[in-house]
Structures are given as structure tokens and as C-alpha cells.
Image (spheres, helix red, strand yellow):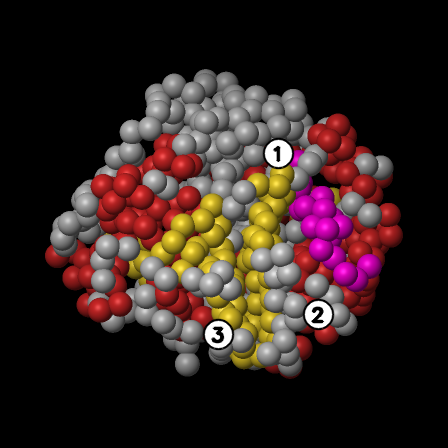
Amino acid sequence: MFPFSKLSILAATAALVIACSPSQPEREAFDPEAATGFAQNQLVISDNYMVSAANPYAVQAGTEVLAAGGSAIDAAVAIQNMLTLVEPQSSGIGGGAFILYWDAAEQRLHTLDARETAPAAVDHELFLNQDGEPARWIDAVVGGRSVGTPGLVRGLADAHQRWGRLPWERLFTSTIEKAEQGFTVSPRLAQLVEMEINPGVSQMSTAAAYFFPQGEALKAGTLKRNPELAQSLRMIARQGPDAFYQGPLAEQMVSAVAAAEIEPGHLSLEDLAQYQVAWRDPVCADYRQQTVCSMGPPSSGGVTLLQTLKMLERFNIADYTPDDAQVWHWFTQASRLAYADRDRYLADADFVDVPVAAMLDAEYLQARSELIGDEDMGTASAGDFNQFVAGINVEQPSTTQISIVDAEGNAVSMTSTIEMGFGSAVMVGGFLLNNQLTDFSLDPYNGEGLAANRLEPGKRPRSSMAPAMTFDSNGELRHVLGSPGGPRIINYVTKTLIGLIDFELDMQAAIELPNVTNLNGSTAIEEELAPTHWRQALQERGHQVNVRSLNSGVHGISIIDGRLQGGADPRREGVAAGQ
Ligand code: DON
């Protein structure tokens, strides 16, 4: 039995970290088994197709599409639509995503960047106060100013055009129906509302009316309708993605941003009309017997994940057990070095010169790995490629991971987000708009010249999202996974890969390994799961140890001997299901 209460949520604001541990009052149970027939917290095995995602209703929408002969991309569209409704704090059509798509017939991996872009009317001083100081992060989040041009609908539509099998409109029916008839509010959604992790939700009138009906926070277990979202989705379903990027819905979004009660923003009709996804090359590296691939810039996720793994490769991790602190000491050191590079160099490569090849160079990473010793190395410095500084950006709990393998063996690994929980809190057409512009460096200077991750019109903010796939030595797909978790995403996905590849655990067991993170600062170990001896063992190696909740939300699928094995992170509310 997983040692969490029904729910454990990490909610953080810039100044405050609140851990909802088992000492929190129990919430009304959300029984996904009763609601959908899916069981949580167990490895699910099937022969044909598999879905793993953050909410049982969304998984149900996906499996229905796959059962009807839909493709992995069809299922992704249906799942994402449902998540917009039932997990509105994490992702939705007002946000953006990165999609890895494995084309089984072509044996080819594609990566699609549907990340938000900065509106044309903003510049790198957007988040500076009158005195030239950057806004407090939480102040920057709320309101129209932080809203980037949403990329998700265009991304899903472009992917569907290429790989969809069922009609686009069909992929909206279950969400439209549920939005009209009502869905059961989950404990996680209710608790995040009640905790006001995003202060904008109660301050902005449209969001407040939805999430605080009659002034009371939405309760778990209640039936919630969202007719406005049903209406928006019906338009997008019937008219296609242009109904989102032009016309009444686009006009509503632009007005809502411009007239936001807090920090009016700059999204324009032209920004929406001109939005385009970017097809990019995946970043890949061999790790032991497998090739690991993920998303390149503007995400820092893939490069940082691969750097960490490559620096760990010279250690015989498989000779140890997963509860041996030595393994996680090495892990934190490799992570320190990788985050030092990430913080300095990674940003949107369409705007700045990101030295991806040099950062993944085997000799470079070998030399970096040799900096790892028996003691915590303290703050790591970045490698020396060129002069820029990417700048610091703070990222907070929300985001969602969708993993899918269809009956033909095509696969999707998609990490999707509106950034902070409840995004900018600007709500329009029944959905929340993102605050993705706060993933840019709020301070464009950082004391060392202009940051690579400074805001520029049309630029995509640096991300940590790391949707991943691995392949065996024959090029066959082995694992599909990813996670939310802000900058800790990279550590969560790396840990799961070590569980899968080094310790040969099944997906569920790998997800359930205790989380450990080091973003080139203190070492965080997971309060609820880390063995008690880790704290002392790491302190003896010089670590400053921080024991806290670490809420990954890994959803993954493995292909083992031709069968599909799905796992879902018990730290959130997801399930895996297949047939
Ligand atoms: O793109 C990113 O990396 C962030 N906007 C993701 C935010 C996130 O994962 C919040 N986490 N739980």
C-alpha cells in the first residue's frame, strides 16, 4: 500500500511552501474505481493499447477513443480536452505543450513544440517595477500581463492533421457532454482551490465565480458543470483550430487579457492569428543499453536529463540497491552540474545560440562527471561555452503528463501546462489562460548582461518539461514517460529512468521510488518515502538536506516482451488503463 493519505499536494508560492502531508484533514474520497472502473496505484498490463494520465475521466476519454480505432494522437486530443475540464489547474486549451510522437510504421520520432510565445507588444522589461526591480514572482503570475499566446490547440490540430484517424470533432464529444452534465470535482482540485495556491483565483471575478460559487470554495465530490467550456469546445470541434485563433473566441481572450482586473496584458488578435507550432529535432543520447530521447530547446528538460544520465553512466548503479544513499549522492552531483549548465545556457534556440551539441558531447560530459566525488561538491559552475546567462525563472506546481501507446505501436509522450496552478487566473470561455511568460527570466539582466532567457516578442520561455521515450538497441520503443513538477521535472523523470534502466523495475515501481532533487542547491529528499537513513547518510557526505514533499506526477508506459505495462504516480490522482 502506498504510504500516502488520499492526497498529498505540494503547493508553493514564491514565499511559501505548504506541504499537505497525511496530517492534513482527510477529504471526501474521489473514487475513480467507482467513477470509471480504473484502479489506482498498480501496474496495469495490456496487449493492445494503453493510456496513463492524471485523471480517470481523462483516461476514460482516451481509452474510448482507442477502443473505437483511434490513434495515439486522437487519444491525446480527447484526453487533453477532458483535462481542460477536470484538471483545470494544470493544463488546458489556454496553455501550451511539448509532444513527442513515435511513428511505429516509419520508425521515427517527431517532436512538436506547441509552447506559448511572447506577444509582439512585450519587451524584456515587462516584469520590472518602476524602480527597475523585478516583480515578486507571485505578483508577476496573476493577471493579464503573464499570458503568452496559447499553443496547445494549434499543436494538437497539426498533430491530428498528420496522424489522426478519427474525425477531429469526435474527439471533443465526451468532454462537451461531461462539461454540460457535470463532472465530480476531485480532492486535489478542491484542495488547491481551498488553499488558494494561486491568489488570483479568488481575486479575478470570472475565476472566482467558477471556483468559489456563492463565495465558497469548490468542494470535492460535488458535480460541477462548465457550459462555457462546452460552448468553446463545440466551436473548436466544428470549425477546427481557427475557431480558437480567430473570431469570437480569440476576441474574448484578447479582451479578457486587456481588461484583466489585475495587471492588464498585451495579447493581441495578431498574436493569436500568427501562432505557429515548431517541429523540432529530438535530443537523444545513449544511456547503457538504451537510447533516451526528449524535447530540445526551448525546453531545458531534454538536455538536462541527458546530461545527468551521461554523467551517471560511469557509476555501476546496478550493483547497488535503490535504497542505497550512495546512488542518490551521485545523482545529486550529476544533477548539480547539469542544472549549472541549464541555468546558464538553455533558452529558446530560435533567439539565442544554445550550444546543445557541445553540452551533450561525450568527452565534455566525461570530464564533468569526473568532478563528482565522495563529498557534496557545493554549488557547481557551468561549463565554459560562451558568455550568456540564461537567467533564473521560478516554476510552480501544476502541469500534466499524458502517455499513450496505440494498437499500432504509435506513441505519444506529451507534457502540457498552463504553468502555475490555475495559470494567470484569467478565465475566459470556461478555461484558464496560462501565465507562461513568468517562465522567462523576470530579471532580464541578472547582473551579468542580458539573460539568454529574457523576454522578447515571439520568443518561447524556457521550460523544464521533459517528455521522454527510450529505445532498445534494435530501435524498438521501450518506455514512454514524463512528469509535471516545475524545474524538478527533470529530476523526477531522470529518477524514473534510473529505476527502469539500472534497477530494471517495472513502471509503477520506478515511479514509486522516493524522489530526490538537487537543482544546484540543497538536496531535497521525499518526506513520505525516503528511507530514514538517507538524511544522515547524505549529511555525512556534506549535503544540506531538506526533507519535504516532492510531488511528481509521472505517467508512463513500458513495452516489455510485446506487452504494455502502464504506471501512474500515486502522488497525484492519475491512473493507467488499457486493453
Ligand atoms: O514549462 C515549464 O517547465 C513549467 N511551466 C512547468 C510548470 C510545472 O511543471 C508546475 N508543476 N508542477
Task: Specify the label residue 197 is tagged with.
Answer: none
Q: Which residue is mark 3?
A: 560
Where is residue 564? Give x, y as percent.
54, 74
For the record, the magenta segment spans 148-167
Residue 8, placed above or below residue 523: below
Which residue type carries mark 2? Answer: Leu
The part of the image, by quadrant, that contains residue 545 is: bottom left
Q: Earlier in the sequence, mark 2 or mark 1?
A: 2
**Of helix, strand and loop, which one carries label 1?**
loop
Q: Earlier in the sequence, mark 3 or mark 2?
A: 2
**Frontmost residue, 143 versus 300:** 300
Q: Is residue 246 magenta?
A: no
Q: Which residue is mark 2?
A: 66
Tell me the residue at 66%/39% (across/down).
277
Q: Which residue is mark 1?
A: 117
In the rendered image, is residue 496 in sight?
A: yes
Numbered disc in front, either 1 or 3? 3
